[in-house]
Image (spheres, helix red, strand yellow):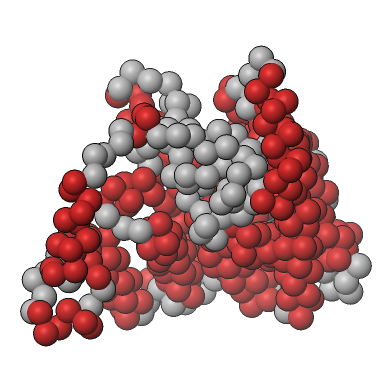
Amino acid sequence: MREYLLTLCITAAVTYLLTGPVRKFAIVAGAMPEIRARDVHREPTPRLGGIAMFFGLCAGLLVADHLTNLHEVFSKSNEPRALLSGAALIWLIGVLDDKFEIDALIKLGGQMIAAGVMVMQGLTILWLPIPSVGNVALTQWQGTLLTVALVVITINAVNFVDGLDGLAAGMVCIASAAFFLYAYRIWVSYGIEAAAPATLFAVILMGMCLGFLPHNMHPARIFMGDSGSMLIGLVLAAGAISITGQMDPDAMNLFSGSERATVHQMVPVYIPLLMPLTIIAIPAADLVLAIVRRTWRGQSPFAADRGHLHHRLLEVGHSHSRAVLIMYFWSALIGFGALSYSVNNASMWIVLSVVALSAIGLVLLLLPRFTPRIPRWAENFVPPRYRRSRTAEATAPAASVPSVPADHRAPVRAGVAGVNGATALSARSRRLDRRKAGSSR
């Protein structure tokens, strides 16, 4: 565990320290796109945060390779090298997209190629534990197709949820923490060395997200961009693939006792089938809803809109920070709920706790819909939105001011005061703006 903690700290430190210089580089390189209709932020913010996250990944793998116990992961398995190869490819595609806005089909092809590179180096699903059937061996083509599909779905699910400051990094960090505890338990408790690569991938992913989050919390100074969202999505999928296709129920000595006891003991075997789904449950639900919504409207599934779950939370009335925290809550509930059930699936308290927390989450989701009438003597003890007198005073002058349509708002350009991350190089940013004004773009 000490070596895992050291790897986590090194990965987080490298990512955190490199994000500042990467932010300045993104401003100089002009990776600050204009604000689009679907964007939530109102100031141009540099992207390319995935550069710092990728070097954090490389630092974590390098440190782990020189540690006594974790070195065995590299000597006995080729999966860390496969992960690095696929991550480098998907990272390059993301960097190009952050700078030049490449086509969605090209990105999809690059994601499939990155998954294929990992499959060629051994990071693939070899068999699946099916309930009431046992282990089902997959052919080479079946394993390749299933691996590529899981990688592509996970990458796009994480990419779709990356719409609010700190949302994608925080949700993936929570999910990877739950996955790390699960994989570590399988490796240490049951002695299955095949779970060691997935444990390493999870702890490195936690370090990448923790190192980037201080720069990405609202108001964000830098965005991870597609170079970061696709990267963490691929690492997340790699860990799930590694442990799913390598699980051996016979090595866990579960087939003992009565038939009912065996069924209960087999839950940790089937969790690898469910854990990848619980990790990306909310992003995957957002992905499916987006595809259905856009197809129903006759649009392309890759067309951008403002109908994602985080957009809906803002429309309900939640603030930016509260919407992010609610998404964190649901990610933690789903991920750690599945983890708790795998540890002790016979306990009814776990099920009741998950149900109770789900009810609390639903109340939090609908909280802005309820505006109770507060007595005047209690207005000093509640937030301003519940104070009738102050609300009336604040809205009275606003009624006499003519409203400005959203289409006639003056655009905010990089290099002016108040722009996120642009004040560090304001003079250079103004020169970039003048050059852009004279270009064809």
Q: Residue 401, percent across and down?
A: 24, 44
Q: Which residue is drawn at 88% across and 71% down?
A: 67
Q: Residue 383, percent across and down?
A: 26, 73
Quadrant containing the N terminus in the rendered view:
bottom right
Q: Which of 150 and 6 is in front in this view?
A: 6
Q: Residue 328, percent across and down?
A: 44, 63
Residue 64: quadrant of the picture? bottom right
Q: Residue at x 73, y 43 (%)?
A: 427
Quadrant containing the C terminus in the rendered view:
top right
Q: Looking at the image, can residue 193 be seen? A: no
Residue 408: quadrant of the picture? top left
Q: Residue most toward the right?
A: 66
Residue 140: quadrant of the picture? top right
Q: Is residue 26 left or right of residue 236?
A: right
Q: Which residue is drawn at 60% across and 44% down?
A: 416
Residue 400 higher or lower than 382, as above or below = above
Residue 296 higher or lower than 229, as above or below = above
Q: Residue 73, percent across and down?
A: 82, 62
Q: Which of 245 and 316 is in front in this view?
A: 316
Q: Nearer the viewer, residue 87 or 368?
A: 368
Q: In this view, does 224 lie to the left or right of 325?
A: right
Q: Is residue 326 left or right of residue 78?
A: left
Q: How many labels does the image show?
A: 0
Q: Looking at the image, can residue 361 be seen? A: yes
Q: Which residue is drawn at 45% across and 66% down?
A: 332
